[in-house]
Amino acid sequence: QVQLVESGGGLVQAGGSLRLSCAASGSILSIDTMGWYRQIPGQQRELVADITNGGRTTYADSVKGRFTISRDNAKNTVYLQMNSLKPEDTAVYYCNANVLWIWGGGTSRISSPWGQGTQVTVSS
């Protein structure tokens, strides 16, 4: 089994900053792309940013220049530094990762688990 555990959400005023972390644990062999998504109630989950294991990044247009995604491969952890936050950034943020891990009997499999979500609220 592989689990993703997020931390770092909270309440912040507009213009402020938050840093989210997401750590993967389990019998992990390797992790390809790791990403952050967000969801507002009643709307679809959308990609915020992702990063490959080689460090190539992708950002949603709405967060370019304000958010920075990074990862520590030794710790199987991905981060999202969020600066200049706006009220429209308010959402539940989820991390996701494409993980190659050891299943029973020594076989490997690929999974794409989600974290439990962390609330980010930006007040105006």
Image (spheres, rainbow, N blue to C red):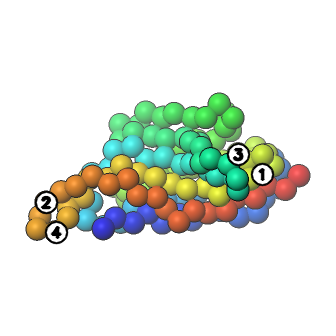
Q: Secondary structure at mark 1?
A: loop
Residue at image mark 3: 83
- Quick check: 45 above or below 65? below
Residue at 13 percent across and 60 percent down: it is 107
Q: Nearer the viewer, residue 72 or 121?
A: 121
Q: CA distance from mark 3 to mark 1?
A: 6 Å
**Percent of width and height locating residue 99:** 32, 53
Disc with the residue nearer the chain's start (3 vs 1): 1
Q: Secondary structure at mark 4?
A: helix
Residue type of the residue flagged with mark 2: Thr
Q: Residues within 10 Å of mark 3 (few under 14, many from 20)?
A: some
Residue at 79 percent across and 55 percent down: it is 122
**Percent of width and height locating residue 96:** 46, 52
* Circle on res. 104: 4
Residue type of the residue flagged with mark 3: Asn
Which residue, as the protein is rendered here, is positioned at the far right? 124
Residue at image mark 2: 107
Residue at 39 percent across and 66 percent down: it is 3
**In the rendered view, does 65 fall on the left or right side of 56?**
right
Q: Secondary structure at mark 3?
A: loop
Residues tagged 4 and 2 counted as in contact (Cβ below 8 A): yes
Residue type of the residue flagged with mark 1: Gly
Residue type of the residue flagged with mark 4: Gly
Residue at image mark 1: 16
Disc with the residue nearer the chain's start (2 vs 1): 1
Q: CA distance from mark 2 to mark 3?
A: 42 Å
